[in-house]
Amino acid sequence: MNRLKKNSPANRIAADKLGIDFKDVQTFLQERKILTQIERICESGNIATEIISNMLNYARKDNVRTNVDLGLLMEKTLHIAMNDQNFK
């Protein structure tokens, strides 16, 4: 995202090579709400990563009883349930 947002020297040089103004690129991205869509894609990827990580942690459990923090378990369960609703 920084490559799209920051008016860095590298961005200005690349834009100059193409004969465009980097501010115009930023305006276009904002007008078309492209940055918002990219942020949503990143958030969805992070949610999917967390869900998969939680599923793998559950699947890898041995048949050994262990003490667990019920509060943390409930928090993770609710988080997974909330994320499931976000995907629908």
Image: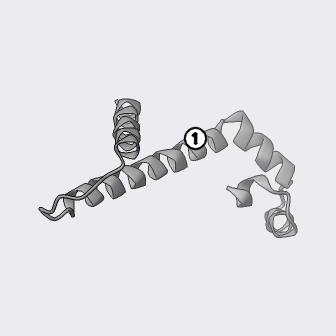
Residue 44 relative to residue 19: left or right: left
Residue 66 relative to residue 73: left or right: left
Q: Quadrant of residue 60?
A: bottom left
Residue 49 relative to residue 38: left or right: left
Residue drawn at x 44%, y 47% as measured from the top left = 47
Label 1 sits on what residue type?
Gln
Binning the other alpha carbons within 10 Å of mark 1 as few (below 14), some (14 to 19) or many (20 upward) gives: few
Residue drawn at x 28%, y 55% as measured from the top left = 67
Residue drawn at x 72%, y 55% as measured from the top left = 4
Q: How many marks?
A: 1
Q: Nearer the viewer, residue 59 or 64?
A: 64
Which quadrant, please, contains the C terminus? top left
Residue 8 relative to residue 4: left or right: right
Q: Secondary structure at mark 1?
A: helix
Residue drawn at x 12%, y 62% as measured from the top left = 63
Q: Quadrant of residue 52?
A: bottom left
Farthest-out residue, front: 67
Farthest-out residue, left: 63
Per the image, the residue denoted by label 1 is 37
Q: Percent from the top left, x then y, of residue 33? A: 65, 36
In the depicted structure, whether residue 71 falls above or below residue 42? above
Which quadrant, please, contains the N terminus? bottom right
In the depicted structure, whether residue 46 falls above or below residue 18? above
In the depicted structure, whether residue 78 falls above or below residue 29? above
Q: Percent from the top left, x then y, of residue 7? A: 85, 57
Q: Quadrant of residue 84?
A: top left
Q: Percent from the top left, x then y, of residue 61? A: 20, 62
Q: In the rendered view, how is the structure colored?
A: one colour
